[in-house]
Image (tube, grey):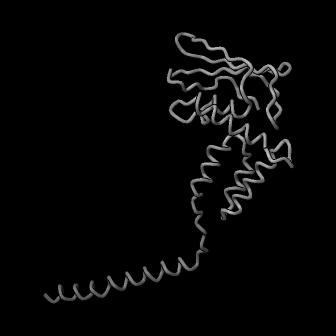
Amino acid sequence: MQTLSALKFSCCTFVPFVVSICIVTFAQADRNQTATPLLQPLPAIYQHWLDEDVRWIISSDERKAFEKLTDNKDRDHFIEEFWSRRDPTPGTTENEFKEEHYRRIAYSNEHFAAHVRGSLTDRGRIYILYGPPDAVQRQAINGVPEEIWRYEAFSAPGRFVGYEGNLPRTGNKVVLVFIDECQCNDYRLKTPQPN
C-alpha cells in the first residue's frame, strides 16, 4: 500500500513539473524566433484584376511587384501606371489599349466559354493577346472538332513573333490549330503559342 501512495505522490508532483518545463521551453523558443509577418490575402477586387483582367498581359516582374503591395492606395496607383505604360496615345483621355483589351475579354467570355470563362481558355488567351484572326477554318478530323486560326499580318503589341509552329515564320503569317477532344467547346491549342 505504501508503494502505491508513493507512486501517486511522485506522479502528482512529476506531471506538473514536466508540463511547466515544456511551457518554459516553448516560450523561450518562441521568443528566440523572429516573427515573420503573415501575408494578408489580396482583396477580391485586386485578385480578380490579377487572375482574370490582366492574367495574360502582366509580366512576372509586374505581378511580383503588385503582390508585394500592402495598401489599396498603392495598388490603385500601380494599376493606373500599368495601363498608362501601355497607352499608345499618352496625354489623351482614352487609353485605346485598355479599351481594346477589355473588349477582347468580353468577346472571349461570350464566344469561347467552356467549363470556365472564355477569357481563361486557350482560344480566349490567344484572342486577348493577339486579337481576332484574319480567317477561321472549322473542320472535324475523325469526329474531333478543330479550329484553324490564320493571322496574315500578325503583330502582337510589344511582342516579336519569330516562329510559326516549330518553323521560322515566313513573313507575318501565323497558323494556330485548336482541337476540341472532349467535344465540349474546350478547344486546346495544339500548335506552339507564338511568343
Q: Is residue 146 above or below residue 10?
A: above
Left or right: 158 with respect to 64?
A: right
Q: Nearer the viewer, residue 30 or 43?
A: 43
- Quarter of the rendering occupied by the C terminus: top right
Asked whether, in this view, residue 158 is left or right of residue 25, the answer is right
Residue 167 spot, x, y in % from top left: 79, 20
- Identify the residue at horizontal 67%, vertical 56% (top origin): 67
Instruction: Determine the image quadrant of residue 31.
Output: bottom right
Left or right of 18, for residue 187:
right
* Residue lying furthest front: 93
Quarter of the image where one finds residue 98: top right
Quadrant containing the N terminus is bottom left
Q: How many marks?
A: 0
Q: Is residue 73 above or below residue 105?
A: below
Locate residue 18 relative to residue 125 in the image: left or right: left
Furthest residue toward top: 142
Expressed as whole percent of the image width and height from the top left, the position of residue 105 reads 65, 36
Residue drawn at point x = 27 percent, y = 83 percent: 11
The residue lying toward the viewer, choosing from 81 and 144, is 81
Residue 149 rendering spot, x and y as whole percentages:
69, 20
Residue at position x 60%, y 69% in the image: 36
Q: Residue at the spot x=58%, y=63% of the render?
A: 40
Q: Is residue 88 above or below residue 32?
A: above
Q: List x then y, in percent, for residue 109.
A: 59, 34
